[in-house]
Image (tube, coloured by chain):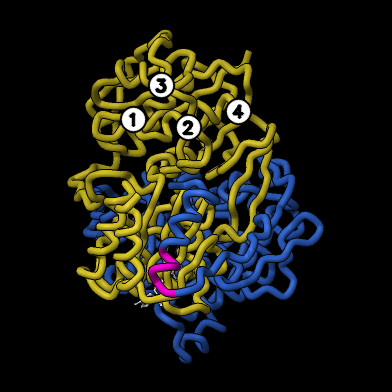
Chain colours: A blue, B yellow
Amino acid sequence: MNIYVLMKKTFDTEEKIQISGGAIEEEGAEFIINPYDEYAIEEAINLRDEHGGEVTVVTVGDEDSEQQLRTALAMGADQAVLINTEDDVEDGDQYTTSTVISTYLKDKEVDLILAGNVAIDQASGQVGPRVADQLDMPYVTTITEISVDGEEVNIVRDVEGDEEKVQTSLPLLVTCQQGLNEPRYPSLPGIMKAKKKPLEELELDDLDLDEDDVEAKTETTDVFLPPEKEAGKVLEGETDEQVKELVSLLRSEAKVL
Amino acid sequence: MTTFLAFGEARDGELRNLSFETIAAAKQIDENAEVVGVVLADQNTENLANDMIQYGADRAVVVEHDDLKEYTSDAYTQAAMAVIEEEDPDGIVMGHTSAGKDLSPRLANKLDSGLVSDITNVDGGEFVRPIYSGKAFEKKTVKDGLTFVTIRPNNIPPFEKDENRSGDVNTLEVDIKDIRTIIKDVVRKASEGVDLSEANIIVAGGRGVKSEEGFEPLYELADELGAAVGASRGACDAGYCDYSLQIGQTGKVVTPDLYIAVGISGAIQHLAGMSNSKVIVAINKDAEANIFNVADYGIVGDLFDVVPKLTEEIKAL
Ligand SMILES: Cc1cc2nc3c(=O)[nH]c(=O)nc-3n(C[C@H](O)[C@H](O)[C@H](O)COP(=O)(O)OP(=O)(O)OC[C@H]3O[C@@H](n4cnc5c(N)ncnc54)[C@H](O)[C@@H]3O)c2cc1C
């Protein structure tokens, strides 16, 4: 099976957010593989081990994205592709990213594409379905189970807490939800091997794309932190008093009861 | 005059609340727009269309088809595209729900359009949305093409229902075919009663609740408050409750008026699903727990002592 994984690097989950010059300050921040993409990588490796074939991890990013691609290779992916748009794209949006990815994929032989259902930074969840539509492929979002038998694919997906059982067929794109698997940590031999695995670097030119072809359709005009919340009131006294005061505050001050 | 499509979302023969929020959002984006309510469903569309109108839509377009009983990307795309082609709108508003998240990017792609997902607020022509798990917000505008947004449930207040309002309902016949993903079965996990994403008050339990029985006092409190019960992933993973109660980045994103977090530490993935709540109460025995950093009111104490007393106090009101 030819399996592709769409991956994005994101800020480390615990990273503090600071803003400078109307944008999120990235200097000095720790980056990780978007956690939902990690589920995609893990599942791709398992499916390859079961059915044979190759796992290729694709990212649209900058030269620093190599680090997360190496981690994916160390987990067990076979090869990686970095589409570096740093010099060509100033302010891309989901249209930009999905167009770049589908242009890269359109002449490949693809059986299965796995992506995260959402990225923990921009959290739009658009790229997977957009890529599928550009490739005219069926897709299933927020999956928690997948099994492949020949061309047939059986999936369980999470629909706001309900479980939906879906049958479909390859070629297919899925987006991964927590619960699908427990991503492995790269092993030491895995990390050594990853250094020698192929990592191809491409730019828009190599895909016959211009900046104009991928120009964003939306624009971010401001980025700001939530209004500083006053420190919450921690209620004092015995439980009985705390509870009385809480109810009174919820009625008179917060006016929610 | 511009035309905006406001997509309703039917479930079990009724419209979810956010259906009406899409209408209000469309009017907020452009107060002069003609707002067309859209209903895609397998039955009862005429009534649902009238609901859309009574909640402020100027008229409605419906597609009624057996294949629209359960959401599938293929069937809903064909139905939605038929409506869009008929109306040629300037803007589209949908809910940021499971179905909306699945459908909107595909439509946006077909329409060669941008899409601003998961907005919580309309500010002139700008859309506000939480990013980085709610640690920051951004404002977005549309540069090119349609104004296409999905709205986070429970953030943009709907208009009052006006039983006297009426308008045109147009039914489109659509030939739905080639559905490539077949739904074999739906296992309903979400409990009956209040939909978490629409609830005004939520009592949520975490790993601190310690067992399935430990959730009982939370249900009793919720009953008194007319609230829904939710949970952290910690509580779900430990088997104290079903995953359908999960709130957070993986689970449901909620914005109630009052959120009572009981025995929940306040991990960032949990906050991503509830930090926009209007008032947050934390009950936790650890005074250092992160949940207190987002709480408006906190009680440091044992939940098994605090929660029953709180229920009694509310009962006495
Ligand atoms: C990719 C990813 C996605 C995730 N998505 C989600 C998500 O959607 N939702 C989510 O919730 N989590 C999510 N998580 C998990 C999250 O990181 C935390 O592990 C989880 O929220 C912890 O749950 P908890 O607060 O119940 O448990 P804990 O962190 O164990 O906290 C339990 C709390 O209970 C308190 N306590 C214990 N006993 C008592 C008592 N008797 N009285 C009062 N207080 C008591 C303790 O002081 C503690 O603060 C996700 C994680 C990852 C990696």
Alpha carbon of mark 4 to alpha carbon of mark 3: how far? 16 Å
Q: Magenta stretch: residue A74 in it?
A: no
Amino acid carrying label 4: it is: Gln
Q: Residue at x 68, y 73 (%)?
A: A29
Name the secondary structure under disc 4.
Answer: helix
Q: Can residue A133 be seen? A: no
Where residue B92 sits: x, y (%)?
A: 53, 28
**Most foreground residue, B69 or A41:** B69
Question: Tag 3 or tag 2, which sits nearer the N-term?
Answer: 2
- Give the residue type that dot 3 points to: Met
Callout 2: SS: helix
**For the magenta stretch, what is the residue range?**
A238-243
User: Image check: A60 left or right of A134?
Assistant: right
Is there a contact, CB below 8 Å, between mark 1 and mark 3? yes
What number is the disc on residue B52?
3
Distance from disc 1 to disc 3, alpha carbons, whole Å, reads 9 Å
Kindly identify which chain the residue marked by label 1 belongs to.
B
**Image-quarter location of ligand 1:** bottom left
Residue at mark 1 shares a chain with residue at mark 3: yes
The mark found on residue B15 in the picture is 1
**Which numbered disc, 4 or 3, marks the residue that appears first in the sequence?**
4
Which image quadrant: the N terminus of chain B?
Answer: top right
For label 4, the residue is: B28
Q: Earlier in the sequence, mark 1 or mark 2?
A: 1
Is disc 2 on the same chain as disc 4?
Answer: yes
